[in-house]
Amino acid sequence: MSTGRLAEASVQSAKPSGTARVTDGRGRGRRPGRGGGMARQQSRVFYLCVAPWVIGFLGLTLYPLGYALWLSLTNSDGISENASFIGLDNYRELLSDPVTRETLVRTGVFVAVVVPLGIIAGLALAVLLNRPIRGRGVFRTLLYLPAVFPPVGAAMAFKMIFDRDAGAANGLLGFADINPVSWLTDPYARYVLMMLTLWACGNAMIISLAGLQDMPKELHEAARLDGASAWQVFRKITIPLLSPVIFFQVITGVIGALQSATPLLLAANPGTSGVTTVPQGDYLYMINVFAQYLAYGRFGYASALLWVLFAVILVITAVIYKLSSGAVFYSFEPEAKK
Amino acid sequence: MILARRTSMYMILIALATLFISPFGWLVITALKNTSELAAYPLHWTPDKWQWSNFSRALTQIPYLAYARNSLTIAVIYSVLVTLSSAWAGFGFARLRARGKGFLFGVLLSTMMMPAMITLIPTYIIFAKTGMVDTYWPWVLWGLSGAPYLIFLFRQFFANMPRELEEAAIIDGCGYGRIFWRIFLPQSWPVLATSLVLSFTWTWGDYIAPSLLLSADHTTLAVAVATEYVTPSTGAPINNLLAAGAVMYIIPVLLLFLVLQKGFVTGSSTSGLK
């Protein structure tokens, strides 16, 4: 699913309808609120409909966004009034700070592991649960449950499993006579974080499942009749037909994973200063933002970090669009859907 | 041969399902242990005597019910407002013609791509300057302005409804407000349910906004559960009470999800993508 395609669909639905044209023609009906006022009335009501959202967007998204840009050029701490303009100093500092580079690399590795594995696991589960088996509704629900778990609940559950003394993970290792591992500290903390993220692959499963169920069956049947193996059908037909869905998951997955802040809860005692005790392996880009913001009160510097993240996300999204233009395959045109 | 394949498939599914729900299971088991079992080595897989009292202790160790009320207040305020305002905006995008609609829809979609975190710091400052920190006003404002994802969901649903519905009403002299309230909104109950559940779950689960905007008294269960089950003198977490508190915090969301599961799963997957 690409933004372009959606916008196209909206333009299409905006085409004038038959009714509107007829009433336009009767413009002189002189009946207040009707007749020639039809189109005008429609657009008035439209603006009334979107006004709350537009006002909210201006006040709660666009203005804060610009404010963040201004903050990133100051040494503001958010509290004292005498924040002064320091130009690009924050950006210069973050570029030369080795911590920025380390957290970027660490976050990149995290994204590169978690996003593909999550999509693949979700797709595998979707294929499994798309087959005619008894009780698949129950299995779907059970596998989807982690995706609706509140993040704090998930973090607490994983903390308990990977607790050094009372955790089930070390209990299992005990059966194999392996000594207890301190899972929540380096170097293992990062694996726990990845497991926690992958645990919620039910979201990917549901999206892939919807894609699978939308697919025309004829192509698969024809290919099987022609002697293609199940794997060939999957690779040559299912995957291409599913590519818009996968593309959607890659984009949203990358954006989501880049902003991942759950380790804040998982790895440290959450709170304003606990953020600095996050194990090195979990010290992702967002954790550094929170540390600068909460622990050191450097609102300006944290804003600069966030604007850099925003720019990185824009670049990555653009690159994914570019790379996928040949690989994403739309089975139907928007027109054909109507 | 076929039987063996079917059996192994069920085995795989049962193993996976067990694996996926085991974190919750372990949380429940931990919640039922006494303190000495938490420190015992080798590990006690199940508690010797199930400490059901941990649940009542978790309720009194911290002002649990007050936090639950805060969570509920915020979640209800936000989910009701955001559902209505998103439905209203979605109605506009789906059914009305106007200049600039395509542009606004593009803006809507691009905000879905924007990292939410970037507005966090300025939003805090703005709310602090306008005296809205430590009140529930931010959730009212966020609710009133709708959520792009939900607007999109409603738009998709409304766009597929037959045009005759509103034509007949207009001939009868009905305004668009009435058409929305009387015809479109009642028809859209699957999306309404999806939207209510989703927005309720977001707010109930959100940790960052309440921890930044609310003081300890007015904060939500998400923050309290994560931070307050500690021994006052040492700051060490009290794991069994923490687990009991977390279980009670998670269950409402799971129940809500299970009750509305069918509409929720189909609504949030198919309408989101088509």
Image (spheres, coloured by chain):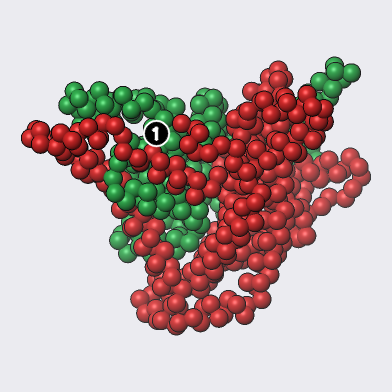
Chain colours: A red, B green
Q: Position of residue A139 (x, y in %)?
A: 68, 26
Task: Looking at the picture, tell me which residue is in the foreground, B249 or A124.
Answer: A124
Picture residue at 66% right of the left edge, 49% below the top:
A327
Is residue A276 shown left or right of residue A44? Answer: right
The residue marked by circle 1 belongs to what chain?
Answer: B
Is residue A41 shown left or right of residue A252? Answer: left
Task: Looking at the picture, tell me which residue is in the foreground, A184 or B206.
Answer: B206
Q: Does A87 appear above or below B114?
A: below
Task: Looking at the picture, tell me which residue is in the foreground, B116 or A225.
Answer: A225
Q: Does A185 appear above or below B251?
A: below
How many numbered badges does the structure rendering display? 1
Picture residue at 19% right of the left edge, 37% below the top:
A24
| Image quadrant in which you'd find residue A69 | bottom left
Instruction: Say few, some or many: other residues with alpha carbon within 10 Å of mark 1 (under 14 / 14 to 19 / 20 or more).
Output: some
Picture residue at 55% right of the left edge, 81% below the top:
A92
Q: Residue furthest front?
A: A25
Q: Position of residue B73 (x, y in %)?
A: 38, 40
Q: Position of residue B242 (x, y in %)?
A: 61, 43
Label 1: which secondary element: helix
Q: Position of residue B17 (x, y in %)?
A: 72, 30
Q: Is residue A247 visible?
A: yes
Task: Looking at the picture, tell me which residue is in the foreground, A82 or B175.
Answer: B175
| Image quadrant in which you'd find residue A63 | bottom left
Q: On the image, numbered disc 1 is attached to which residue?
A: B159
Is residue A48 shown left or right of residue A14? Answer: left
| Image quadrant in which you'd find residue A151 | top right
Q: Is residue A156 visible?
A: no
